[in-house]
Amino acid sequence: MRPVAVLLSLFVWMFGAEPSWARGLSPAAGTVAGALERAAGGPVKLRISRTTGAPSFLSVGAGHSINLDIAASARAEDRARRFLQSYGQALGLPGASEVTVLGVNGPDVAGMEHVRLQHTYRGVPVRGGQLTVHLRGAGVTAVHARTVTDIAGIDVTPTVSAADAVAAARALVAEQYAATDAAPGAPQLELFPTSSSPTTSWPMNGPTG
């Protein structure tokens, strides 16, 4: 067992993570993480989520970037998606199809562009799941990520319709606040992570009226 222990220690040291990272990340995601370092041509620093076991932040050293097989002139969101196609598994995503673009900022004074994305599952937004990919040309220098893992196979078909959700919200407001003319905002189906099992929900903006 000694050679295995030495190799594991070296692997953890190379990626700048604690031993919990090696235990928490799946073998497939660990392979992708190794490819990240090779694409960057230098060390990749990882911060691991204690909740999901997936990286919540990664960055490369000064003068390095994770090179992407795409032109620097491509749209920022396309470059971000290319990164996720190649390396998203290390962040808890199976690929770029599991995100939607929320916004793009930049280039800023440092020449950086920042793409904010929403984690989705089967087209349904995952509550609290967002990523920001920081780009410089055709390379990625850092990623902030909050993804929800272990949701494969979840049925995202709601058991309550949008209309019934609105009716229930109106009834609750009428009961609690005696407001009979409340108008809740349009509901948006989401996958809501819970401590037991993810479930779908219909969050909506507070009523007005």
Image (cartoon, rainbow, N blue to C red):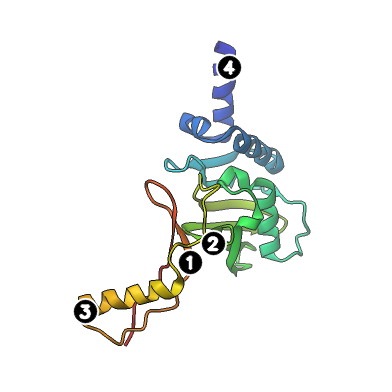
Above or below residue 171? Residue 53 is: above
Q: Is residue 125 left or right of residue 64?
A: left
Residue under label 1, please give it: 189
Residue at the disc numbered 4: 4
- How far from the left and from the top, in percent, is residue 110? 61, 62
Kindly check if marks 3 and 2 are in contact, taking CB atoms under 8 A apart as contact.
Answer: no
Residue 124's tag is: 2
Callouts 2 and 1 close, C-beta under 8 Å: yes
Q: Earlier in the sequence, mark 3 or mark 1?
A: 3
Alpha carbons under labels 1 and 4: distance apart: 46 Å
- Disc 3 vs disc 4: which is toward the camera? 3
Q: What x and y, as percent, mark residue 59?
A: 57, 47
Q: Determine whether the residue tagged by mark 2 lies in a helix, strand or loop.
A: strand
Quick one: SS at disc 1?
loop
Q: Secondary structure at mark 4?
A: helix
Say whether disc 2 or disc 1 marks the residue closer to the N-terminus: 2
Residue 10 sits in quarter: top right
Which amino acid type is shown beneath numbered disc 2?
Val
Q: Residues within 10 Å of mark 2 (few under 14, many from 20)?
A: many
Instruction: Residue 202: name its quadrant.
Output: bottom left
Q: CA distance from mark 3 to mark 2?
A: 31 Å
